[in-house]
Amino acid sequence: MTTSTAAATRTTAPLGRLLGAELRWVLRRPRTLVVLGLLGLVPLAIAIGIATTGGPSAGRGPGLVAQVAGNGFVLPVVALGLSLALLLPLAVASAGADAIAGEAATGTLRGLLLAPVGRLRLVVMKSAGVVTVAVLAVLVVAVVGMVAGTVVVGGAQGTLVTLSGTTLGVGEALGRIGLVAVWTVGQLLAVGAVALAISTLTEHPLVVLACVLGGLIVFGVLSAIPSLDWLQPVLLTTGFSAGTDVLRDPMPLDGLGSSTVRALVYVVLGLAVTAWRMRRRDA
């Protein structure tokens, strides 16, 4: 009786301890720190470029980038939009690749599969690491963008001039920035879920990165072909440009809503495949 009780106790490792160990491993990984540092340079580079070239008055900077001049609150939105094209998915895909395929390549995954953790708990633990990277990556871009926009770019104190020509106060401007940051995290979670699913199929992290980033590039190409408009609802990258809708007044919600639903579908499918593969994976 005592033996069976001890065995039962060993099979229920504290989830909080597992999550803490996973987060420490993720945050101490040099690759994560390097990627976060590079992401912080994106808004800073935009701010310095706008400040040194004189912005739209000098005829420089396409589209939204030109709107940053004298309107610093636009910078975090623009930086998030530009980073979502490649750098942010790269950060999350890298985390998903290392979470399972990376550990399989180093042999540590075998120990986790044999440990009294539980396969579904292992999926939760690895998913938490990917979510953490996604949130931190977006926070770095948004916060550095806010600081750089205020200090380097400047503009009317405490206001945001929308693309519609209206002016928003500091409270509503911060709310719009917070909304696009949360929305961006949602898009990245879809990328991370796909990366985790692919990561269960290989022991090579670079294969996961190639598949995820290559897939996003292919999606982007397909979305640019007019005759393939019928594919738009299923392409994850279709809604990647919807974040700039927060700069309009009134703010349209169709693009943000549809892209969020699409990302949620990818998250569910990706995690379902990950859980299914991990439950059937040999140690």
Image (cartoon, helix red, strand yellow):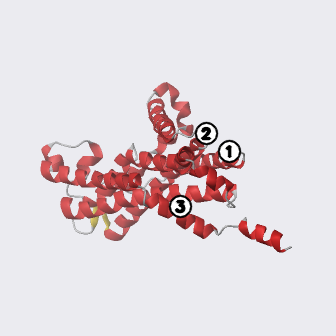
**Residue type at the position of mark 2:** Leu
- In the picture of the structure, the residue carrying the numbered disc 1 is 277
Horizontal placement of 121 versus 192: left or right? right
- Of the numbered discs 2 and 1, the one sitting upstream in the chain is 2
Looking at the image, do the residues carrying marks 2 and 1 touch, with CB atoms under 8 Å apart?
yes
Q: Nearer the viewer, residue 214 or 167?
A: 214
Looking at the image, do the residues carrying marks 1 and 3 touch, with CB atoms under 8 Å apart?
no
* Quarter of the image where one finds residue 176: bottom left
Residue 66 visible? yes
Identity of the residue drawn at 33% across and 63% down:
143
- Of the numbered discs 1 and 3, the one sitting upstream in the chain is 3
Query: Badge 2: few (under 14), some or many (20 or more) residues near its Cα, within 10 Å?
Result: some
Q: Tell me the distance, in whole angstroms, between the alpha carbons under discs 1 and 3.
A: 20 Å
Identity of the residue drawn at 18% across and 42% down:
60
Horizontal placement of 159 versus 196: left or right? left
Res 201 label: 2
**Residue type at the position of mark 1:** Arg
Outermost residue, top direction? Answer: 227
Q: Tell me the distance, in whole angstroms, between the alpha carbons under discs 2 and 3.
A: 21 Å
Above or below residue 43? Residue 222 is: above
- In the picture of the structure, the residue carrying the numbered disc 3 is 22
